[in-house]
Each structure stands twice: as structure tokens, then as C-alpha cells.
Image (tube, rainbow, N blue to C red):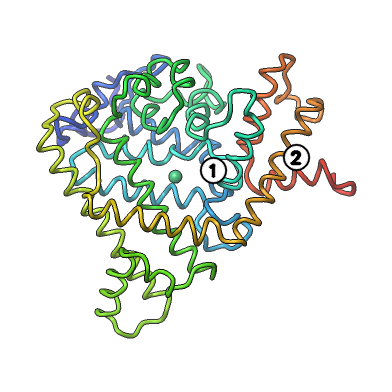
């Protein structure tokens, strides 16, 4: 191997990992064979490719809950993604799982998200209902497998199997059947690696907490309402007890950091217990075991309560619903207009085959940032816009 730096070998970099952790050296490999990297592990290379991708940069201008132009301090898909990676890495390090793989999966997990958050995804799925539908997890996989155009030898980023497996969090049986190896577990009922399981729960911890913060910041939620949420009530009382008098925003942050900490510590402790019981000695034994990365029953119930609260009070707030309705109109308007006349599409999104054309339109719309989608909508529907 051509060593550029006097650095640790990939095997040395992963020597501290637990037996159940995924190791680069034992990866099921990439779709197109490539020489091994010299100064980093295979999973570090995946992470680096993701960070350098176009889809990753677009995350900055895609909605999490609040549309990008609604305020500078709300989470975007990008800052959400970074928070997921932070939480997932903390958990992985404690469990001696592969931090690099967890980071790669976390950074890629939302690459396939449409503009305008879940509203955009629902609208596009509805538009595609007679054409195989639209799932954002599947789209994230399409981005890293096909849509990124960066490398000389292949389309996509040519990531390792384990990273791709982790990105595909959910998948219908129908889609799983045509995906081959990476879809297999949805047919056989197996689990993904411990790293994929960690990234999945880190996603939930991140959005449950930052959505409280953004909800309060926007004024759509009020602290008094949150008293019905046990996780909030316990940790808010602790923050008030410690500080008595603090201005509103600091007290909110002191509460949320405590909630995040409780969730992470509970996740690590419960997972350790599950690992002691199942004793997996390889990633394949993790795949065969029941889900290992989990919260305790008590905390899981509290997290569900918080999620229900957010659903009812934030995601269904009339001001968020107005955005949702607008997003539906924009996405559906774009889709229908392009479907009726594909000559309106930029040439590299045009195809002669009808089925291919429909999927290309979905790829084009899914790839748009919020503001690009709005601009494109204006160009098509407003007479004095060009
Ligand atoms: Mg996410």
C-alpha cells in the first residue's frame, strides 16, 4: 500500500472497536471495486464523499419544519443532519461501535429529502402514486447510488454496502425486492448494523429536541403548554432548581440539553444491557438479533408522549399547515406542468421514454432546494417572471 502519511493503518484505526461493530476491512464492499484508501478507513472515505457531494450542500436550503426564508435561526436539513451526527457519534463512541460509519450514515440520512420537508415528500409521493411512489429514504439511496455526478468511473458516490444499508432506513417490500442485497433485510425481517440502528435513534433524539426549541423560538409553542410533556416537566424543574432566575432562552436551552443528555444516557445504558443479553460477536449476529439499540420502556414512553405533543401542537399548527398547503401546491404544480410538457424541463432532465421521464421529473423536483422550487414555480406560473 502506498502510504502517504506516517499514520495508523485502517486496521489500527479500528482496533479499539467492539466485536459487534462494523469494520472497514470486513465491509461487503462497494458496487464498483476501488483500490483501498491509504490514510483513512473505507467508512471515513464514505463520510468524506458525502460531505463533498452536491446533495449535501443543498441540505442548507431545505426545510426541516420551518421553510428556510422564515428565519435564520431555525434548523435546516443541514443543521439537523449535523445534530444527528453529533448525537450518533457520542452514542457510538460509548458503545465502541464504528463512529466513522455512524457519521457517514447520519450525514447521508436525509440527502433524498424534497424541498419543504414532509409536506414536499407527501406531495411528491401523491404525484407519483401511479408511477411507483416516492420515498425519501429510497431517494437518499438513489442520490448516493446514481444521481451524484462527481466521479470518472461511476455514477453516484459508490459507497460501502454498510453505509448504503444504513441510509435505507425504511423500504416497502415491493421496492426492497428490486433493490437486491441492500433491500434483503426488509424481506427477511433482519436488522441492520448496530451503527445504522444508532443513527436511526439519533435522528429521533435530534428532531424531537430541536423541534421544541424551534417551536418555542417561533412562538408557535409556549412553555406553559409543554408542562403536559413529562420529559420537559422533569428537566425544566431541574433547570429552574439550579438557576432560579434565567432569561427565557437560556432556561429553554438548559432544559433541552438535559433532555438530550437523559435520552442519550438512557439509550447507551439500555443498549449495553441488550448487548450483554444477546452477546453478538459480529455485525452479522447483530443483524440476526432483535433490535439492540433502544430506550428503556419508561423513556421510550416519554419520547412517544413528546412526539405526540409535537405532532398535535407544532406540525398541525395552523401556521405550519399553511406552509404545508403551499408546499403541496408548488410541488404538484411543478410535477403536473412538467408531466404535461417535458419540453419545459432543462434538457438534461428530458427523456424519450415515458416511465423514465416521470422518474426524472421526480428526481429533478426532489433535488430542488426550497427557494429553487419557489423560483421555478414563479418562472412557470407568473407572467412577468423569467
Ligand atoms: Mg432526519
Q: Which of 201 and 373 is in front in this view?
A: 201
Q: Is 92 on the left or on the right of 177, as rendered?
A: left
> Which residue lies at the image location 32% right of the left edge and 35% below the top edge?
196
Judged from the image, the secondary structure of the residue bearing numbered disc 2 is: helix
Q: Nearer the viewer, residue 164 or 321?
A: 321
Q: Which residue lies under the disc numbered 2?
A: 333
The residue positioned 28% from the left and 69% from the top of the image is 235
Quarter of the rendering occupied by the C terminus: top right
What whole-number distance in Å separates the C-alpha atoms at marks 2 and 1?
25 Å
Instruction: Indicate the quadrant containing the N terminus: top left, top right, bottom left or bottom right.
Output: top left
The residue carrying pointer 2 sits among few (fewer than 14), some (14 to 19) or many (20 or more) residues within 10 Å by Cα, namely some
- List x then y, in percent, for residue 255: 33, 69
- Give the mark, 2 or 1, whose residue is nearer the N terminus: 1
The front one of 217 and 98 is 217
User: Which residue in the protein does label 1 denote?
Assistant: 57
Residue 38, picture quadrant: top left
Mark 1 Cα within 10 Å, few/some/many (few <14, many 20+)? some
Q: Where is residue 169 in the image (x, y as percent from the top left)?
A: 40, 33
The residue located at (49%, 48%) in the rendering is: 78
Look at the numbered disc 1 and give the secondary structure of its residue.
helix
Q: Is residue 110 above or below residue 323?
A: above
Amino acid at each position: 500500500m502506498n502510504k502517504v502519511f506516517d499514520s495508523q493503518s485502517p486496521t489500527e484505526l479500528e482496533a479499539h472497536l467492539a466485536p459487534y461493530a462494523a469494520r472497514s476491512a470486513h465491509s461487503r464492499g462497494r458496487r464498483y471495486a476501488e483500490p483501498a484508501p491509504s490514510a483513512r478507513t473505507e467508512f471515513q472515505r464514505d463520510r468524506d464523499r458525502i460531505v463533498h457531494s452536491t446533495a449535501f450542500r443543498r441540505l442548507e436550503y431545505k426545510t426541516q419544519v420551518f421553510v428556510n426564508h422564515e428565519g435564520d435561526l431555525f434548523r435546516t436539513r443541514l443543521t439537523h443532519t449535523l445534530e444527528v451526527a453529533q448525537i450518533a457519534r457520542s452514542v457510538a463512541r460509548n458503545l465502541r461501535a464504528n463512529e466513522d460509519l455512524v457519521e457517514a450514515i447520519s450525514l447521508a440520512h436525509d440527502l433524498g429529502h424534497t424541498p419543504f420537508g414532509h409536506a414536499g415528500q407527501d406531495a411528491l409521493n401523491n404525484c407519483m402514486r401511479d408511477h411507483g411512489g416516492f420515498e425519501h429514504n429510497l431517494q437518499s439511496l438513489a442520490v448516493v447510488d446514481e444521481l451524484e455526478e462527481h466521479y470518472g468511473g461511476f455514477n453516484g458516490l459508490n459507497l460501502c454496502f454498510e453505509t448504503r444499508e444504513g441510509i435505507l432506513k425504511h423500504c416497502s417490500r415491493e421496492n426492497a425486492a428490486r433493490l437486491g442485497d441492500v433491500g434483503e433485510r426488509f424481506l427477511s425481517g433482519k436488522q441492520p448494523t448496530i451503527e445504522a440502528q444508532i443513527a436511526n435513534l439519533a435522528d429521533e433524539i435530534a428532531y424531537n429536541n430541536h423541534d421544541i426549541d424551534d417551536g418555542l423560538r417561533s412562538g408557535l409553542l409556549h412553555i406553559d403548554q409543554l408542562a403536559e410533556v413529562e420529559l420537559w416537566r422533569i428537566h425544566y424543574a431541574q433547570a429552574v432548581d439550579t438557576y432560579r432566575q434565567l432569561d427565557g432562552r437560556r432556561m429553554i436551552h438548559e432544559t433541552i440539553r438535559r433532555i438530550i443528555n437523559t435520552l442519550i444516557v438512557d439509550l447507551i445504558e439500555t443498549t449495553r444491557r441488550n448487548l450483554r443479553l444477546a452477546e453478538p460477536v459480529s455485525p452479522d449476529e447483530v443483524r440476526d438479533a432483535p433490535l439492540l439499540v433502544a430506550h428503556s420502556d419508561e423513556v421510550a414512553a416519554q419520547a412517544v408522549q413528546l412526539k405526540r405533543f409535537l405532532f398535535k401542537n407544532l406540525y398541525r399548527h395552523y401556521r405550519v399547515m399553511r406552509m404545508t398547503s403551499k408546499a403541496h401546491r408548488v410541488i404538484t404544480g411543478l410535477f403536473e406542468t412538467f408531466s404535461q410538457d417535458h419540453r419545459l424541463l432543462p434538457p438534461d432532465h428530458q427523456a424519450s421514454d415515458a416511465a423514465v421521464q416521470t422518474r426524472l421529473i421526480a428526481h429533478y423536483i426532489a433535488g430542488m432546494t426550497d427557494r429553487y422550487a419557489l423560483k421555478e414555480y414563479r418562472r412557470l406560473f407568473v407572467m412577468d417572471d423569467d
